[in-house]
Image (tube, rainbow, N blue to C red):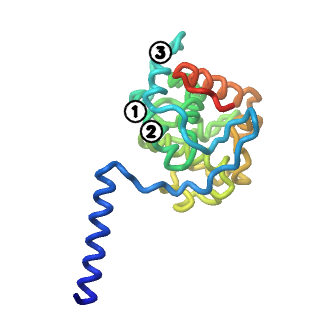
């Protein structure tokens, strides 16, 4: 067998193997950087796997009582939105289920009663500041979620030194990634607020309280 035929055969085998893996539901693992260091007791890392599925997040959101007043105003159904958060979080190694909880706090349960209307697909108040600012707008809900996840990675991962591929999985859509300095300055959700993402001193406790409530609703032990 000639060298060219050997090379063609090797390429064909590689293609068939990859096709078989994809058909079986296997996907290449995203490049989300090295794993975060273990969290101290009572804290929850920003980086890590989601503990709740999209379906569990949706069930809690729809079943929670009392429901806030006003109409749901996101551009996609909540079941679609939770799927985006879990998927995009997995791509970047960020806890997408907690990011969803963060978006609930930021948007007033997606009622969007503040300075950021629902059509902007901005679920984290990116660009909105205490003094006003210009809230970012994104072309669709997934892009808005992706920007939030990328921004969280800037806060949590010291290796995410630039909003590029790599270290990110996808092209940069976070317009304020460069403003987080130094990168990795808030590796736990407990450190959010007090100038990290928000100025409120109760920002982190409120996110963690809602997250614990969601976990309890779904029978998932809280890791903090």
The answer for how far apart the CA atoms under marks 2 and 1 are is: 6 Å
Label 3 or label 1, whichever lies nearer to me, is: 3
The answer for how far apart the CA atoms under marks 3 and 1 are is: 16 Å
Of residues 101 and 3, the one nearer the viewer is: 3
Q: Are marks 2 and 1 in contact (CB under 8 Å)?
A: yes
Residue at 22% across / 88% down in the picture? 1
Q: Relative to residue 210, is residue 64 depicted above or below?
A: above
Residue at 29% across / 66% down in the picture? 15
Q: Which mark is residue 84?
A: 2
Q: Give x and y (percent) for residue 45.
A: 67, 41
Q: Which mark is residue 80?
A: 1
Q: Relative to residue 149, is residue 110 depicted above or below?
A: above
Which type of secondary structure does the marked residue at label 1 adopt?
A: helix
Crowd around label 2: few <14 · some 14–19 · many ≥20 (10 Å): many
Among the 4 quarters of the image, the one containing residue 115: top right
The answer to which of marks 3 and 1 sits earlier in the sequence is 3
Position of the C terminus, as image quadrant, is: top right
Horizontal placement of 72 versus 203: left or right? left
Q: Are marks 3 and 2 in contact (CB under 8 Å)?
A: no
Q: Give x and y (percent) for residue 80.
A: 40, 33
The answer to which of marks 3 and 2 sits earlier in the sequence is 3
Q: Relative to residue 144, is residue 2 depicted above or below?
A: below
Residue at 45% across / 21% down in the picture? 59
| Residue under pointer 3 | 63
Of residues 181 and 25, the one nearer the viewer is: 25
The answer for how far apart the CA atoms under marks 3 and 2 are is: 20 Å
Of residues 128 and 63, the one nearer the viewer is: 63
Q: Give x and y (percent) for residue 155.
A: 67, 47
Of residues 84 and 32, the one nearer the viewer is: 32
Which type of secondary structure does the marked residue at label 2 adopt?
A: helix
């Amino acid at each position: 067998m000639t060298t060219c035929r050997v090379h063609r055969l090797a390429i064909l085998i590689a293609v068939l193997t990859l096709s078989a893996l994809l058909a079986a539901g296997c996907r290449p693992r995203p490049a989300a950087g090295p794993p975060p260091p273990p969290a101290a007791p009572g804290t929850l890392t920003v980086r890590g796997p989601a503990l709740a599925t999209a379906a569990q997040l949706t069930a809690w959101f729809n079943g929670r009582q009392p429901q806030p007043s006003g109409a749901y105003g996101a551009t996609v159904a909540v079941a679609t939105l939770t799927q985006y958060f879990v998927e995009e979080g997995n791509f970047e190694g960020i806890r997408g289920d907690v990011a969803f909880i963060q978006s609930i706090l930021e948007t007033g349960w997606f009622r969007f009663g503040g300075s950021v209307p629902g059509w902007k697909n901005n679920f984290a108040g990116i660009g909105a500041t205490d003094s006003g600012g210009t809230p970012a707008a994104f072309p669709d809900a997934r892009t808005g979620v992706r920007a939030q996840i990328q921004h969280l990675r800037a806060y949590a991962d010291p290796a995410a030194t630039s909003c590029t591929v790599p270290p990110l999985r996808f092209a940069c859509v976070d317009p304020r990634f460069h403003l987080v300095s130094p990168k990795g300055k808030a590796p736990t959700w407990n450190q959010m607020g007090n100038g990290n993402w928000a100025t409120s001193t109760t920002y982190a406790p409120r996110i963690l309280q809602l997250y614990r409530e969601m976990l309890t609703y779904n029978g998932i032990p809280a890791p903090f």
